[in-house]
Image (spheres, rainbow, N blue to C red):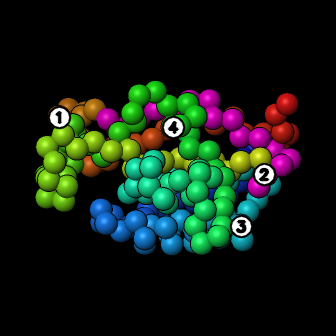
């Protein structure tokens, strides 16, 4: 994806296995995503965003954020919410009427709230000649419009300052 005046950026939209007990599958899937990034990496930092169906403490998310290895491999992406979000950033919550029935059937916990949607950006070690600073992260679609909820998940918006020149 061309970024005017800066160069090309790889944007990967992702969704991983949704079942609560599918962390093993999610681990394989995030390794495959990082392999895809490595094969198609552009000079500008990669952005990987989507529904990962895993909380920040899950192995798949810890792998993406450089906090643990999987299969002897490690990577580092910045979690935009961790860098610049305020509050918990719950994206799948009983507070959303579109999600209540689904959560009731799958989780069966009346106060369920989790952060499972993310924006990740590549770090300097994979993109040493560029920079991507997370300026802000916020929820989107987290309120109904005219009584209608846009989705069963709240979205994540990340404001990124991307430059072909590394930051000082």
Dot 3 or dot 4, earlier in sequence = 3
**Mark seen at residue 147:** 1
Circle 2 residue = 125
Image point 82% across, 34% down: which residue?
167
Is 34 within the magenta?
A: no
Dot 4 or dot 2, earlier in sequence = 4
Mark 1 element type: loop
Dot 2 or dot 3, earlier in sequence = 3
Q: What stretch is highlighted in magenta?
A: 126-142
Q: Pointers 2 and 1 in contact (CB under 8 A)? A: no
Image point 77% across, 47% down: which residue?
124
**How far from the left and from the top, in percent, is residue 16?**
42, 65
Circle 3 residue = 38
Q: How far apart are marks 4 and 2 (CA)?
A: 20 Å
Circle 4 residue = 81
Mark 3 element type: helix
**How far from the left and from the top, in percent, is residue 142?**
32, 35
Is 127 within the magenta?
A: yes
Q: How far apart are marks 1 and 4 (CA)?
A: 27 Å
Dot 3 or dot 1, earlier in sequence = 3
The label nearer to you, 1 versus 4, is 4
User: The N terminus appears in which quarter of the rendering?
Assistant: bottom right
């Amino acid at each position: 994806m061309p970024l005017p005046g800066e160069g090309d950026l790889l944007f990967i939209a992702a969704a991983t296995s949704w079942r609560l007990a599918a962390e093993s599958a999610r681990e394989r899937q995030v390794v495959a995503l990082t392999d895809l990034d490595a094969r198609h990496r552009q000079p500008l930092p990669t952005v990987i965003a989507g529904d990962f169906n895993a909380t920040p403490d899950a192995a798949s998310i810890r792998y993406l954020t450089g906090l643990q290895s999987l299969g002897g491999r490690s990577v580092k992406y910045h979690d935009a919410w961790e860098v610049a979000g305020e509050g918990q950033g719950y994206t799948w919550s009983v507070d959303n009427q579109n999600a209540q029935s689904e959560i009731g059937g799958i989780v069966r916990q009346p106060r369920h709230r989790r952060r499972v949607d993310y924006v990740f950006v590549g770090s300097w070690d994979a993109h040493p000649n560029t920079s991507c600073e997370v300026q802000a992260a916020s929820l989107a679609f987290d309120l109904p419009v005219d009584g209608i909820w846009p989705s069963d998940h709240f979205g994540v918006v990340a404001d990124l300052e991307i430059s072909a020149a590394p930051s000082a």
